[in-house]
Image: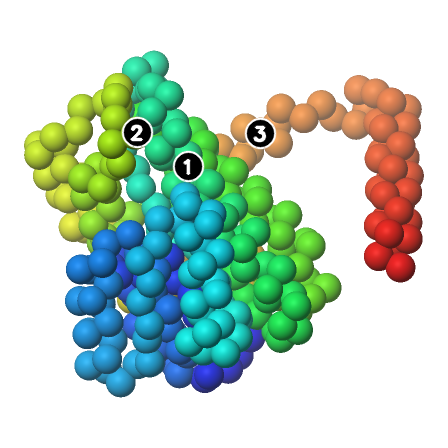
Amino acid sequence: MQDFNGQIAFITGGASGAGLGQAQVFGRAGARIVIADVRAEAIETALAALAGEGITAHGIVLDIMDREAYARAADEVEQVFGAPPTLLFNTAGVNSFGPVEKTTYADFDWIVGVNLGGVINGMVTFVPRMIAAGKPGHIVTVSSMGGLQGSAIAAPYSAAKAAVVNLMESYRAGLAQYGIGVSVVCPANIKTNIAEASRLRPAQFAGSGYVENEASIASLHSIHAHGMEPIELAEHVKAAIEQNQLYVIPYPEAKEQLRRHYDEIVDAVLPMEADPEGARKRTEALRNWAADRARVFQKSEG
């Protein structure tokens, strides 16, 4: 996608941080913006800021874990703008830090529920509508550098973000035939208010194994204060969409760390000469299975 003028962009977590940066950058490029956020007051503030720039924007209060609410939000987008989004940004996320061995069910349910479940809800809600509309589009999901390797102090977050990377790779392969591109953003640090996420933690997910208090929030703020500006990150996202790029990792300082991590994985693969005949048979079986599945899918669609 090269031209954003007149596109409809649906952005979760759009009232602040990375989401608001996306709203500003793509709104300035001519897109009509829908910001979805769980915080009504933040939406009103963001809408006023966007209106001040002459950006057409609409706000929807949305808990991305609520599938019925997500469907209503999708209906509202079509009522307001006459069509489903052509740009979908799965940006909303939460985090909390603590020792992996002290992680509770509530920690997993909340952190994975938002960071992975919320993305799934966005995809299942909007992808069929985008396909039915028959227009070129693009989907951007915010993962994290934490999704590219594990973390002893952010295990639920890293696990959810890793699943998001894998999921976007799958959608990328599946949606190309419909003219819908897919990108996954893996930030290292953003100047955002995600440090405040624990204040929004619903009561049904109480019972964390982590320390969540004013001191921990202040500590996180001290880290994020040095992060990349949301608008700068959104400009990188815009360039990635224009180039139909899958991975968006605008952090050159992370390159060697990632190289060491993935070299360790690649080096664990046995050399071909260890079992050449077994490798040949496994490859052939997989290829035959894939061809058979393709024939079944084509037949079912016919």
Q: Which mark is residue 205?
A: 2
In the orientation shown, which residue stands out farthest toward the top? 101
Tell me the CA gap for discs 2 and 1: 10 Å
Q: Which residue is mark 1?
A: 113
Q: Which residue is mark 3?
A: 265
What's the amino acid at mark 2? Phe
Is the residue marked by circle 2 packed among few (<14), some (14-19), or many (20+) residues within 10 Å? some
Is the residue marked by circle 3 packed among few (<14), some (14-19), or many (20+) residues within 10 Å? few
Placement of the N terminus among the 4 image quadrants: bottom right
Depth check, mark 2 against mark 3: the one in front is: 2
Tell which circle, 2 or 3, labels the residue nearer the N-terminal end. Answer: 2
Tell me the CA gap for discs 1 and 3: 28 Å
Placement of the C terminus among the 4 image quadrants: bottom right
Disc 3 element: helix
Viewer-proximal residue among 38 and 161 = 38
Q: Is residue 243 left or right of residue 97?
A: right
Q: Is residue 122 left or right of residue 295?
A: left
Q: Residue at x 80, y 20 (%)?
A: 274
Q: Determine whether 244 is above or below 157 in the image.
A: below
What's the amino acid at mark 3? Ile
Q: Residue at x 43, y 67 (%)?
A: 76
Q: Position of residue 175 (x, y in %)?
A: 66, 59
Disc 1 element: helix
Tell which circle, 1 or 3, labels the residue nearer the N-terminal end. Answer: 1
Depth check, mark 1 against mark 3: the one in front is: 1
Q: Are marks 2 and 1 in contact (CB under 8 Å)?
A: yes
Tell me the CA gap for discs 2 and 3: 35 Å
Tell which circle, 2 or 1, labels the residue nearer the N-terminal end. Answer: 1
